[in-house]
Structures are given as C-alpha cells and as structure tokens.
C-alpha cells in the first residue's frame, strides 16, 4: 500500500534513533552510558502518585471533558496567577495528552497549506515535523552561538512575510538550555504584534532554571502580548511526569475552542487519573520539584568545566532545562571525521557513550548531552569522550 505523502516526508527522531542503538548495545552486554535522555531520572513525587491512585479508587476512571477536567483547569489557572501574574478563563485553557500533542493540535488548528511558521535554530526536533504535518512550511532563523543561540528582533522582522502565521519561542530551550531576557522577549513580541504573527511559547522547562535565573513568559509582559500568545506547558519535566502525558495550552479562546473540537475527534480526552495526579502537582507541594531542580544544577556546575576542558570542545553554559549543547566540530575534525554525526557514531561504538548529534536540531556542529542522569555516570562519560578525542587526534 502507498502511504500518505504527509508521513513520507517526516524525519525520524534523532533522539529515539540514538536511544535505540544504545539499548541494542546494552542488550549485547556492553556498559553503555546514555546521555540522550529527555526526561528527569527521578520518579514522579509520591504525593502525585497517591492522588492518582486515590482518584481511581474513588471511581474517577471514565471519560472527562475533551479539554480537561474543570478542576484541573482551575489548578492551571492558579499556577499562571501565582507564577506569571496573568489570568486566564476556563475557556482559554485546553488540557491535552502531553505538551507534544497539544502543539500538534495547535498547528492543525491554525495552519493551512502554505502557511509559514518561523522556527529558530537550534530547535526541538518535533517542531518542523508538526508544522509540515499541518501543511505548513518551516522557516528557519539561526540563533548564533555567540548570542547564546538566541535570535534577535531584527532576524525575526526579516523572516516575516505575508505567509507567516506563527513564531515558535522556546525558553528555556531544548536543546541549548538558553533563556531569553525580559527585554529580548519584549522586542520579539513587538515584532509579532506589529505583523499579527501568533507567538507559540513553549515553556515546558519553566521550572528548571539555574544560576539565579528567572523564567519570564512573554505572555506576562503586556495584555497585548498575552492576546498574541498561545502558551504551551505541562508537568512532564517540572514534576518528572513524562509518562503521564499531561500538557496544556492557554490563550485566545477561539483557538482553544478549535483545538478542543479537534481533540474531541482524536484523543477524546486526556487520561482521567493522570489529570487527577496533575491537580495534586499544582495544588500541593512536598518540595520534590525544588529538590530535583537543585540536583540538576549541581550536576551542571559539576561537569561543565570538565566538558570544556576536552580538546576541541566549546560550550555555552545553559541557564535552564537539563541539556548541554557543546560545539564539537573542532574535536571531530581533529579526530579525522568529516561530520559530527560520524564522530558521535564512532564514540558510541568505541567508548559506549550515547550522545545526540545536533544535526537533528538544526545545528550540525553540536551535540546534545543530557545531565538527567547520575553525576557518576556523567563524569565517566566525559572521561570516555576525552579519551576518545585524545586517542584519535591526528
């Protein structure tokens, strides 16, 4: 059978491909250190698990409204009020089956064939694919390493034309960990308001920030920017709930209504007991989220200097998320490889360290290392990478 054109153009996930190869080597008995993880290495906090179990015991195992439980929407609205000092109504909030599917639903709701979406590079691997699946065209603008991988208002202005429908903003960023300042956000937002371009603000790593950095949502800067923005967030990263699949969107009620109608014909509703667990995540707090954040910050500070001491490796120190995104092009060249992808593959084969090549994120000179793993594993991984670089330097 001939497959639909929409799937024939998809690029397989680089992260999943590396993870699969690392798993294969592990099953063969090799001591593999995987640094491709896109999820915290902590279990979901117990109070959240207890709330979900309690909901099932109380009989909350049926369908819920397509856009999520009203009580969960209220908890999300309370989170926005507490953290960003902005207010949404129930009609302006949609709960979905993970932030990834929320983004997918959003693009399906707003894009027609030929519409353009501006995506800064480096980008999360699914943004371009989701845009293409909705009939849209990704338009890339480069976040320069010299500017902490962030794009400027001038770059954004130059990329906008009559086909531009939306601009994706991801702060803190996957894969770079970079964060935009309030003034940078305001400048980008002003351009979008001027040209009536929808801002899609992916804030999934909001709670994981370091070095005294403070997360700012572009939607909190003014009523005008709030009206121009769809905020996408969730509990996967902040509360170590990746498998629970709960994300949400907040913004213009007409867009939310369209997304809700789509969801009613695709997922029906987010999983009921996961929603009850998320209510607890946002209305109770046992300190687990901050404990996890502190652990990530300690790992980052502990391994960053060791990373940049490796010959041919440079790195912008991230302010958020749980990834390092070093430039290793010089190391790959020193080792006689014509691409970083080939260098990454050789390290996995020889030293059994799984990195994610930056080509999947639109940055072929870099690799992504997740520090959502133990400090001992991180240290050993860096020892192996440095050994490889030194042994193969020509």
Image (cartoon, rainbow, N blue to C red):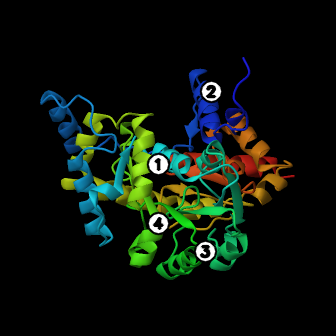
Task: Assess disc 4: are there few (<14), some (14-19) or many (≥20) residues with their C-alpha within 10 Å of its C-alpha.
Answer: many
Q: For mark 2, what is the residue?
A: 25
Q: Badge 2, how many Cα within 10 Å: few under 14, some, many 20+?
A: some
Q: Which residue is mark 3?
A: 195
Q: Earlier in the sequence, mark 2 or mark 1?
A: 2
Position of 270 with respect to 356 (left or right) is: left
SS class, disc 2: helix
Which residue corresponds to mark 4?
Answer: 229
Asked whether the beta carbons under mark 2 and mark 3 sit within 8 Å of each other, the answer is no
Q: Which residue is mark 1?
A: 372
**Viewer-closest of 165 and 45:** 165
Question: From mark 3 to mark 4, how far is it between C-alphas?
Answer: 13 Å
Q: CA distance from mark 2 to mark 1?
A: 20 Å
Q: Mark 3 to mark 1: distance in Å?
A: 39 Å
Q: Residues within 10 Å of mark 3 (few under 14, many from 20)?
A: some
Height in image: 157 above or below 207?
below
Tag 3–tag 1 contact (CB < 8 Å): no
Front label number (3 vs 1)? 3
* Mark 2 or mark 4, whichever is nearer to me: 4
Q: CA distance from mark 2 to mark 4?
A: 44 Å
Instruction: Find residue 237 and report its horizontal and vertical position in percent.
Output: 40, 50
Q: Distance of mark 2 from mark 3, alpha carbons?
A: 50 Å
Q: What residue is at 48 percent from the left and 69 percent from the top?
A: 228
Q: Is residue 193 above or below residue 136?
A: below
Which element carries disc 4, helix, strand or loop?
strand
Residue mark closest to the camera, 3 vs 4: 3
State the image coordinates of residue 386 (x, y, percent, origin top left). Answer: 68, 52
Q: Earlier in the sequence, mark 2 or mark 4?
A: 2
């Amino acid at each position: 059978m001939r497959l639909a054109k929409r799937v024939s153009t998809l690029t397989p996930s680089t992260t999943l491909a590396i993870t699969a190869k690392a798993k294969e080597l592990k099953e063969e008995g090799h001591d593999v250190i995987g640094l491709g993880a896109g999820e915290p290495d902590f279990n979901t906090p117990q109070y959240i698990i207890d709330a979900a179990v309690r909901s099932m015991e109380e009989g909350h195992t049926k369908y819920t409204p397509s856009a999520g439980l009203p009580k969960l929407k209220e908890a999300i609205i309370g989170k926005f009020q507490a953290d960003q000092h902005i207010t949404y109504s129930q009609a302006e909030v949609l709960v979905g089956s993970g932030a990834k599917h929320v983004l997918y639903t959003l693009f399906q709701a707003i894009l027609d064939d030929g519409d353009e979406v501006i995506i800064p590079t480096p980008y999360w691997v699914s943004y371009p694919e989701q845009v293409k699946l909705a009939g849209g065209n990704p338009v890339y603008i480069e976040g320069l390493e010299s500017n902490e991988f962030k794009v400027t208002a001038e770059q954004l202005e130059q990329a906008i034309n009559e086909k531009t429908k939306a601009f994706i903003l991801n702060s803190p960023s996957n894969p770079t960990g970079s964060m935009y300042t309030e003034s940078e956000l305001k400048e980008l937002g002003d351009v979008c308001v001027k040209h009536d371009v929808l801002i899609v603000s992916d804030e999934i790593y909001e709670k994981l920030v370091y070095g005294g950095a403070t997360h700012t949502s572009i939607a909190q800067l003014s009523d005008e920017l709030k009206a121009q923005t769809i905020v996408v967030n969730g509990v996967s990263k902040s509360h170590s709930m990746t498998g629970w699949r709960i994300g949400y969107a907040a913004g213009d009620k007409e867009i939310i209504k369209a997304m809700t109608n789509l969801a009613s014909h695709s997922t029906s509703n987010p999983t009921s007991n996961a929603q009850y667990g998320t209510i607890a995540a946002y209305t109770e707090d046992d300190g687990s989220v901050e404990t996890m954040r502190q652990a990530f910050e300690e790992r980052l500070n502990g391994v960053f200097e060791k990373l940049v001491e490796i010959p041919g490796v440079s790195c912008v120190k991230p302010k958020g998320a749980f990834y390092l995104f070093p430039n290793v092009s010089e190391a790959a060249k020193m080792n006689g490889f014509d691409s970083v992808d080939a260098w990454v593959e050789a390290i996995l084969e020889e030293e059994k360290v799984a990195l994610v090549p930056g080509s999947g994120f639109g940055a072929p000179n870099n690799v992504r290392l997740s520090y959502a793993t133990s400090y001992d594993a991180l240290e050993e991984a860096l020892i192996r990478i440095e050994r490889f670089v030194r042994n193969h330097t020509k």
